[in-house]
Amino acid sequence: MAANFIILALQAQSTGSLFGLVFPIGLMLVVAYFILILPQQKRQKKWQTMLDALKAGDKVITSGGIRGTVIALKEDALHLRVPPDNLRIEVSKASVVSVASGDEGK
């Protein structure tokens, strides 16, 4: 008796339209695009613009927490002067997370 009820319930569900199955999935993908993908693309573009605008004298912070002043630029790296001993280190451009112009704080 219970098996017949389950079979009838499954047959009733299988008669739904294809639109009723595809629409919710499509709607979830559109919402995910606007909530997740689009903001990440905007952040990536803003970060890339910041890296392209780097110049000598800019004060930067790397992802590792190193704060320094840009001395020289290479294609994919930059040289930083790090206080207090004025160490000169080379880091990749991709590690830079924020920039403050060299004129601030003077």
Image: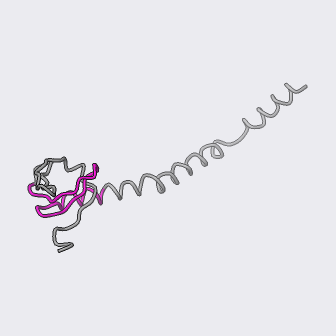
Which residues are the magenta region?
Answer: 45-72
Q: Residue at x 42, y 52 (%)?
A: 37
Quadrant of the drawing holding the C terminus? bottom left
**Nearer to the camera, 68 or 3:** 68
As drawn, is 1 to the left or to the right of 72? right
Q: Position of residue 68 (x, y in %)?
A: 18, 57
**Nearer to the camera, 52 or 34:** 52
Q: Residue at x 13, y 51 (%)?
A: 78
Total residue callouts: 0
**Nearer to the camera, 33 or 90:** 90
As drawn, is 39 to the left or to the right of 29? left
Q: Residue at x 16, y 57 (%)?
A: 83
Quadrant of the drawing holding the N terminus? top right
Query: In the displayed image of the protein, which residue is found farthest to the right?
Result: 1
**Nearer to the camera, 83 or 52:** 83
Query: In the displayed image of the protein, which residue is found farthest to the front?
Result: 85
As drawn, is 91 to the left or to the right of 14? left
Q: Position of residue 104 (x, y in %)?
A: 20, 72
**Colour option used:** one colour
Is residue 90 inside the magenta stretch?
no
Q: Where is residue 8 in the image (x, y as percent from the top left)?
A: 82, 31
Is residue 60 inside the magenta stretch?
yes
Vertically, is 5 above or below 74? Answer: above
Q: Where is residue 20 in the image (x, y as percent from the top left)?
A: 66, 46
As drawn, is 60 to the left or to the right of 6? left
Query: In the displayed image of the protein, which residue is found farthest to the left?
Result: 72
